Image: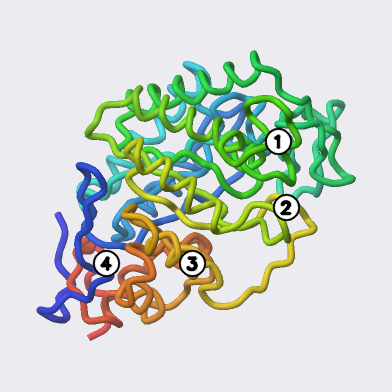
Amino acid sequence: MTVPMTVSMTAPLLFSRIVLGQLTLQNRVIISPMCQYSAVNGNASDWHAVHFGRMLASGAGMFIIEATAVELAGRISPACLSLASDENEAALARVLKIARAHAHAHSTMPIAIQLAHAGRKASTAIPWVGTGQVSLAQGGWISYGPSALPFDGAYSAPIAMDKNDIARVRTAFVDAAKRAVNLGFDAIEVHAAHGYLLHQFLSPFTNQRTDEYGGSLENRMRLTREVFDAVRAAVPHKIPVGVRISASDWIDGTWDVTQSIELVKVLQSSGCAWVDTSSGGLSLTQKITLGPGYQVPFSAAIKAATAVPTMAVGLIESAEQAQTIVQEGRADMVALGRAFLWNAAWVWHAAKTLGATIPIPPQYVRGVPN
């Protein structure tokens, strides 16, 4: 049961519906994937059950769970989620059952999963425990990348992937996508951002290959296109598949928004349902100019050049800011991460501020300010 928090009869655009493929979202606020660093051997834990339940009761349009590795070697850290085995699938099934039982009596919010491979940034320390790469002696593992170039001096050089490695990873994405279908996820996001494996293949900064996966833009896009096409073909048509990209490396002469637009056009022809438009993460040499909504121009440029729905991310904090972004047509949706970690009721507060109507659990109705 839910009780509407009624403020106004006119819904602002942020609180209007949007259709992604065959999936309808009740509003345009998206919960970004946020690593919880709470998995054990890739298995979801009780912490995830609590976290998922909180997010599912938040009133957002869609919840995308954290970057989930398609193989254990693709985890960002030893405490990151994986969906590479029956054990991983069973653990996530248990957590989803608990979270859905808690929240879905009050919410029909779709749940998406972000499938990922960390590439050369794998085996990284948990943020509140340490920095740099976890060594083999400490329980870490050898990483993979398009070329044998380490992330920085605190990381060892990855194994430059051969054709067998590429085929293995491509198959791992497909297998994980099939497991996601088994688990009842409503949508899938392919992670090609933040300096992780697919982004590493896209950028000439990290991709120094001379075969068909390196060199030209077409070649550097090849693996991302192959992975996306394989995932799209492996799941039912009713499940939309989107992609998260870093629209710029923030490094002169490498991956930029112009190349990103070409990538999105290629993926658009393959049925890409949305593009989650982030940036950076490839190298510590990046020069990022931070500010409120600093990544929104990337979303606006991609939205103007393609017909693919876009999500804007990055230092979007207030309801008014989010509403302005979608109202001015710079993005179709806004995706928030840290804002939800700090305030799981962000959507309720935004609805109150903007004069929208949104259902909330009856247990919390008496807390709504008059």
Q: Few, some or many C-alpha atoms within 10 Å of disc 3 (few <14, some 14-19, many ≥20)?
A: some
Amino acid type indicated by mark 1: Ala
Q: Distance between the residues labelled 3 and 4?
A: 20 Å
**Could you say which quadrant of the image residue 120 lies in?**
top right
Can you tell which of label 2 and label 3 is closer to the viewer? 3
Amino acid type indicated by mark 4: Tyr
Can you tell which of label 3 and label 4 is closer to the viewer? 3
Tell me the residue at 35%/62% (across/down). 333
Tell me the residue at 51%/73% (across/down). 293
- Give x and y (percent) for residue 246: 57, 53
Where is 174 relative to 61, above or below? above
Q: Distance between the residues labelled 2 and 4?
A: 32 Å
Can you tell which of label 2 and label 1 is closer to the viewer? 1
Disc on res. 364: 4
Write down the residue under mark 2: 128
Write down the residue under mark 3: 339
Q: What element carries label 4?
A: helix
Tag 2 near tag 4, CB within 8 Å: no
The extreme top residue here reads 164
Tag 3 near tag 1, CB within 8 Å: no
Quarter that holds the N terminus = bottom left
Q: Image check: 318 left or right of 216?
A: left
**Which is more N-terminal, label 1 or label 3?**
1
